[in-house]
Amino acid sequence: MGKNILEFKHVGKRYDENVVLRDINFGVEAGKFYTLLGPSGSGKTTILRIIAGFDQASSGEVLFDGQRINDVPANQRQVNTVFQDYALFPHMNVAENVAFGLQIKGVKKTVIQQRVKEALHLVRLDGYGERAITAMSGGQRQRVAIARAIVNRPKVLLLDEALSALDHKLRVDMQRELRQLQRQLGITFIFVTHDQEEALAMSDQIMIINDGRIQQTGTPVDIYDEPLNHFVADFIGESNIVPGVMKKDYVVNINGQDFECVDAGMKPNEKVEVVIRPEDLDITTVDKGELKATVDTQLFRGVDYQITAHDQREHEWKINSIHKTTVGAQVGIVFDPEDIHVMRYNESEEDFDARLDSYEEDED
Amino acid sequence: MKRKVAWGKVYLGLVFVILYAPILYLMIFSFSSGKTMERYHGFSFQHYADLFADSRMITIVINTVLVAVLASLIATIVGTLGALAIKESRGAWRNSLLSLNNVLMVSPDVIIGASFLIFFTVLGIRLGFISVLLSHIAFSIPIVVLMVLPKINELSPTLVDAAYDLGATRWQALSRVILPAISPGIIAGYFMALTYSLDDFAVTFFVTGNGFSTLSVEIYSRARQGVNLEINALSTLMFLVSLALVIGYYFVSKHAGRRQRVVAVKEGDAQ
Ligand SMILES: Nc1ncnc2c1ncn2[C@@H]1O[C@H](COP(=O)(O)OP(=O)(O)OP(=O)(O)O)[C@@H](O)[C@H]1O
Ligand SMILES: [Mg+2]
């Protein structure tokens, strides 16, 4: 465990009767890229506002570099924010907006000029310094907001859906650009998005938020391959989630059929949910298939075909395949034991991690 | 369709003729060499010469302008701060502040004037420059609040957060972000207050003492003694000044944003 630059301990937030955050706990290691991912209204912006100091936690502690900062005002925190609505100063031009933080700190004018220029270059806005904010497009404004925050070289940078207004190509470019910048400057990024692809592509660590709670924290691979619960599995990527029964360690029963799997540590005959990613399912002939199904729809998406099919028990399966099939055809579906991921109902993140550790150790 | 448009224009023209005819009539006679407005006697600047020789009148003009400029300036400062305070306040308190402000806007000048008279008399303040100034400030403040508040409401609430985020103190957030951003409203409020103060009669009538008078009160008392074309000359000049003010306001408000930018560019010039 590295040193935590930022830590939330049992942080709660409510507006009158409306509980927005319930018992949020996490630690943020310096120099890493964190993403808060969750649906609209899940409390992502609220967490950022508490970190930045615009809002106060109703309960719990916020630590920065080990110091409690609950009562430190926003203008004294070593944190900068890219706001969801940009919050650019309308009466200043682009360069003045970017220069504002440095001017407040009393940095020398020549230095300001240089750093503003660099920051604008970073967000691909060279030569836009003299433009009025009102004369910038939504995506350009968003980049001004990024430049305005980053020019201050804070210890922690908070980005609230900082790329949402950009077109796909620019967005991918900016993702790479931001990631590179983050590594280069060693700034800790806390990035909010509800775009899961963006989260998977950029983050060292992803925190999945729903309903004011952190559902799961982990690397993109962990979260994708081993989702903790139905919400995470459903929210990240496409997935087939079916009910099943854990017969014994490494054997799960789906729809009355036993399958070998790689999960263990549950009670015998425990009711569970099984996740299989669509890209892990392969289509084959009926006699070779572990499941038999009828193809309902097929959609070409460029890289692959998105196929839906239903089995004999009328359960629907999503399959992503690079091979074409025909609608109405009888096919077999195959998958490997490693493709099956078993989730217990209401398992906490600690229990989940402990269980994984216990049987993964056995294997070694 | 075409007919309709034409009638609309005729109607509009008629309205403007009716509105401006009396003023025009008055202006034309200010250049007449005669002593009355019954008949035009031929062009002369006689009444303008009379006006500039009338030192009492000149003093009153200066007083009026002084009161208007001072009162609207102070009212703009107080009103802007008031609007900011109203914005900061919450719930019932905010509503009552707003209502108190609006009641002052709609209550008749006569009532306000009379209550000021009673107020000053009770406090023992001598009627004169100070009493007129104070009452003008008082009735201008709600006007400024009304002009500034919508601008404040327009501001994104995260704008102030952004200023704090970048390290600004409360004062810096106010002076460098909020005030510049709402400056069009402040300027509008100032000019509104200025015009209200310049042409106020009812309130001023109650609170002017013996030695002190403003234009509207003076013109009223002179007009009662019979027509004097010096008044026409004065009115013409006032009309031209207010026209200039309106045009000036138009340009100031249109270029307010740009001018500030030019001033500030020198600090953060990136090019
Ligand atoms: N000032 C406030 N007063 C009352 N409720 C609030 C306030 N600010 C936020 N909320 C509520 O808190 C919840 C979480 O809001 P938040 O802005 O953190 O969501 P979010 O995850 O950022 O969503 P989005 O992706 O739409 O930006 C919402 O239900 C919202 O209605
Ligand atoms: Mg948000």
Image (tube, coloured by chain):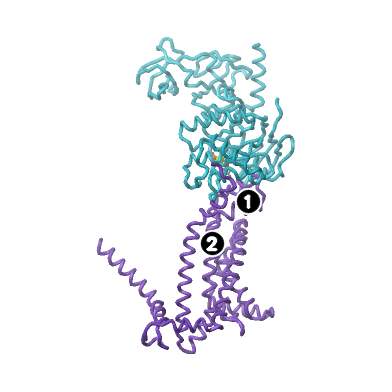
Chain colours: A cyan, B purple
Tell me the chain of label 2. Answer: B
* Residue furthest right in the image: A67
Disc 2 marks a residue whose amino acid type is Ile
The answer to which quarter of the image holds residue A245 is top right
- Along the line of sight, the residue nearer the viewer: A265 or B127: B127
Given residues B159 and A347, the one toward you in this image is: B159
Which residue is at the front of the view, A312 or A291? A291
Q: What is the crowding at mark 1: few (fewer than 14 residues within 10 Å), some, or many (at least 20)?
A: some
Please state if B267 lies on the left or on the right of A307 as rendered. right
Can the viewer see residue A346?
no
Tag count in the figure? 2
Task: List x then y, in percent, for residue A49.
Answer: 62, 42
Depth check: A186 or B269 in front? B269
Residue B187, disc: 2
- Counting from the top left corner in percent of width and height, residue A165 is at 49, 38
Q: Quadrant of residue A64?
A: top right
Chain under callout 1: B
Residue drawn 55% across the image and 66% down it = B143
Is the residue indicated by label 1 positioned so its CB lies within 8 Å of ligand 1? no
Label number found at residue B173: 1
